[in-house]
Image (cartoon, rainbow, N blue to C red):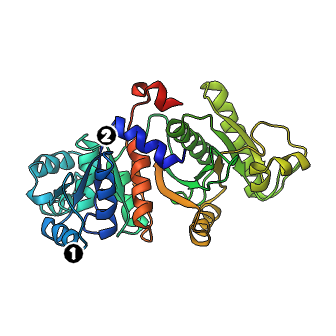
Amino acid sequence: MPLIKKLSVRLQNHPKRLIYPDGEDIRVIKAARQFATRKLGVPILVGDKDAIVARASENDVRLDGIKVVTPRDSDDFEILLKIMSGLPVFRDIGASQLQSMAAQPLYYALLMLATNRCDAMVTGASTSTVNSLRPIFQIISRQKGVSTASSMMIVSTGIEGLGIDGDLFMSDCGVVADPTQDQLCDIAITTATLAGNITLARPKIAMLSFVTKTPNPKNPSVLKVKAATALVHSKIISERLDMEVDGELQVDAALRPDVAAQKGLSSSVAGHANVLIFPDLNSGNITSKMLQSVSSTIRCYGQILTGLVKPVGEISRGATEDDIFGTSVVVGAQAVDRRFLSIEEML
């Protein structure tokens, strides 16, 4: 069963509240309509209510089952403003400026998410990544023991035998430009943990490089990946994590059993990886954008931010309605507590 369909079934059993700061964007309105129609939860569109209603009407999109909120007019605004003023990062900001910030859809949505007034958020449809990430990292805390937040792209290839039922989980494709070996370790662990929680399958992490298992590497990038692989392996053992890792691996050796065999690789990861960790943002972002651009059959969902205490999707401004809907399903499913899943949902 395709990942988005499988996660949709999970959300039908455990509906969630999804908030969208880009509520006036017609692609977001249509994605929210899909989310509500399929009974996955309650979408919350944030923006100018009149503009959202008009945009929906112009495009024949019904708003029943969808909550529409203008920040300043909401019942929660003053409460959220007070909470915002108490956060250390905003304490030196004047009252007037702070009020203006809280009225911005992104800040308002993040405050809603941080205070459990919704369960997950999808943003980025009309905002650059840089302008989205700064408020997110100001308000949403990192998970305990995690120093580096990053981002994951889910690539649904439809290719049987590849990844987890055709799905690959790739990081970092949007946040950390040149991660250190310690940051790569964080990225690998948080990405694999999220992939495992979403799919309920065992993550197999490939630490990617432009070479495979070089005996005496000299290149700084290869040395970094080699060291990061050792750190991930050590953490898996010390924390008894249900995941595997191998590296440094070229991407064909990570994904193709025949190539792994030709190169004499015998680990359970080589040729069977489902989590791909890139050595830097150049390689990760270029790969994800290329896949989105060259194939009409491959679907990409994300970025999904990893290492945060709340589920957040930070999509591209070029995202389609279906991309936004798919990302919504992923972060919604991320908010479902695994302890409450039925046997049928876990199969």
Classify mark 2: helix, strand or loop.
loop
- Res 243 label: none
Measuring from the top left, give residue 222's x and y in whole percent.
Answer: 76, 54
Most foreground residue, 165 or 123: 165
Q: Which quadrant would the C terminus be assigned to in this image?
A: top right
Residue 276 visible from this viewpoint: yes
Residue identified by numbered label 2 = 15
Measuring from the top left, give residue 313's x and y in whole percent.
Answer: 41, 54
Q: Kindly identify the residue that appears in the image at 60 percent across and 59 percent down.
A: 178
Q: Which amino acid does label 1 sit on?
A: Glu
Q: Which quadrant would the N terminus be assigned to in this image?
A: top right
Q: Kindly identify the residue that appears in the image at 47 percent across and 49 percent down.
A: 4
Q: Kindly identify the residue that appears in the image at 22 percent across and 51 percent down.
A: 91
Most foreground residue, 24 or 205: 24
| Quarter-of-image position of residue 320 | bottom left
Asked if the residues shown at circle 2 and circle 1 are in contact, with their CB atoms under 8 angstroms apart, the answer is no
Most foreground residue, 236 or 169: 169
Most foreground residue, 225 or 12: 12
Residue identified by numbered label 1 = 58
Q: How far apart are marks 2 and 1 (CA)?
A: 28 Å
Q: Which of marks 2 and 1 is nearer the N terminus?
A: 2
Mark 1 residue crowding within 10 angstroms, few (<14) / some (14–19) / many (20+): few
Q: What residue type is labelled 2?
A: Pro
| Quarter-of-image position of residue 250 | bottom right
Measuring from the top left, give residue 297's x and y in whole percent.
Answer: 59, 64
Measuring from the top left, give residue 289's x and y in whole percent.
Answer: 57, 68
Mark 2 residue crowding within 10 angstroms, few (<14) / some (14–19) / many (20+): many
In this picture, residue 299 sits left or right of residue 279:
left
State whether residue 219 is above or below residue 248: below
Classify mark 1: helix, strand or loop.
helix
| Quarter-of-image position of residue 179 | bottom right
Residue 309 visible from this viewpoint: no
